[in-house]
C-alpha cells in the first residue's frame, strides 16, 4: 500500500498503551483524520522534539488505515509550532479552546471544508500576536458560527465579520462590544458544540 503525505494541524493527542499516541489532526481540505503513532513516546528519531503537540502545523507521512481504521503515522516533520501561543497562559488557553471547537465540528471523510482549516490556521496566527486575546476570541467565534450556519450577521457584528483574522488587532477599539456581547456569543458556541455531531 502506498504511503500518504500531507500537511496537518494537530487538534489533540491521547496516550495509548505504554508508548503509543493517538493523534487527531485537520487536513488542508478540512478533513479530520486519526493516526496512531507507534512508539511515539520512545522514538526520538521519528517523533522527536515535541513535534506531535496540539496546535503544531506538521507534515505527516503515513500508511492509510483500512475502512474505519486508524492511519499509521510513519514520520512527522514540524512546519510551524506557533511559538507565540506559549507566551502566556491566556493565549495558550484560547488556542487550546479554538482547537477543541474545530475538533468537535471536523468530520472524517469531509474533504470540502478547507474554510475550517484556514480559519484554524489564521486564528492560531492571530492569537500569537493578539494585543487583546478576548477581542480575538470574539473574532474567531463570530467567523466560526457564521461558517457553521449557526448565526445570521447582525449590524454589530459587521466589523468582526469584515476584518480578516490577520487584522484582529485593528478591532481593539470594539472592546466595549466584546464586553457587552461575548457572554451571549460564548453561550451560542457552547450550545452548538454540545449538539454538534462528533
Image (cartoon, rainbow, N blue to C red):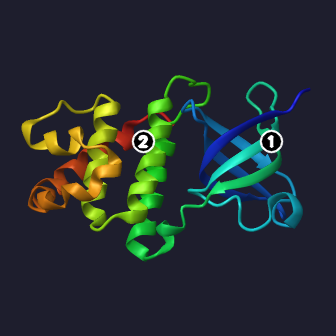
Identify which residue is drawn at 34% across, 64% down. 130
Position in image of residue 141 (x %, y %): 30, 47
- Residue closer to the observer: 21 or 8: 8
Residue 105 visible at all: no
- Residue closer to the observer: 57 or 183: 57
Identify the image quadrant of the N terminus: top right
For marks 2 and 1, the one nearer the N-term is: 1
Residue position marked by numbered label 1 in the rendering: 61
- Residue closer to the observer: 186 or 173: 173
Q: Quadrant of residue 63?
A: top right
Q: Is residue 108 above or below residue 122?
A: above
Position in image of residue 12 (x %, y %): 60, 54
Give the total of numbered labels: 2
Taking the image as shown, residue 58 lies to the left or right of residue 94, namely right
Q: Quadrant of residue 153?
A: top left
Identify which residue is drawn at 22% across, 33% down. 151
Q: Is residue 22 above or below residue 129?
A: above
Taking the image as shown, residue 49 lies to the left or right of residue 157, namely right
Mark drawn on residue 46: none
Residue position marked by numbered label 2 in the rendering: 119
Q: Is residue 59 above or below residue 90?
A: above
Asked whether disc 2 touches disc 1, contact meaning CB atoms under 8 Å apart, the reply is: no
Residue 73 visible at all: yes
- Residue closer to the observer: 103 or 57: 57
Taking the image as shown, residue 133 lies to the left or right of residue 9, namely left
Looking at the image, the residue that sits furthest to the right is 1
Position in image of residue 147 (x %, y %): 34, 32
**What element does badge 1 sit on?**
strand
Amino acid at each position: 500500500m502506498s504511503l500518504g503525505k500531507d500537511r496537518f494541524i494537530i487538534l489533540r493527542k491521547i496516550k495509548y498503551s505504554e508508548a503509543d499516541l493517538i493523534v487527531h489532526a485537520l487536513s488542508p481540505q478540512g478533513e479530520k483524520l486519526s493516526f496512531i503513532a507507534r512508539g511515539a513516546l520512545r522514538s526520538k528519531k521519528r517523533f522527536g522534539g515535541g513535534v506531535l503537540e496540539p496546535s503544531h502545523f506538521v507534515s505527516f507521512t503515513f500508511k492509510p488505515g483500512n475502512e474505519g481504521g486508524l492511519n499509521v503515522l510513519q514520520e512527522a516533520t514540524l512546519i510551524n509550532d506557533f511559538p507565540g501561543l506559549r507566551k502566556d497562559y491566556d493565549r495558550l488557553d484560547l488556542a487550546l479552546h479554538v482547537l477543541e471547537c474545530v475538533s468537535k465540528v471536523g468530520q472524517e471523510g469531509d474533504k470540502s471544508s478547507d474554510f475550517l482549516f484556514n480559519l484554524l490556521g489564521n486564528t492560531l496566527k492571530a492569537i500569537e500576536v493578539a494585543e487583546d486575546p478576548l477581542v480575538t476570541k470574539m473574532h474567531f467565534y463570530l467567523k466560526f458560527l457564521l461558517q457553521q450556519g449557526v448565526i445570521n450577521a447582525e449590524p454589530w457584528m459587521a466589523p468582526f465579520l469584515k476584518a480578516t483574522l490577520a487584522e484582529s488587532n485593528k478591532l481593539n477599539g470594539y472592546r466595549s462590544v466584546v464586553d457587552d456581547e461575548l457572554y451571549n456569543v460564548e453561550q451560542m458556541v457552547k450550545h452548538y458544540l454540545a449538539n454538534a455531531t462528533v
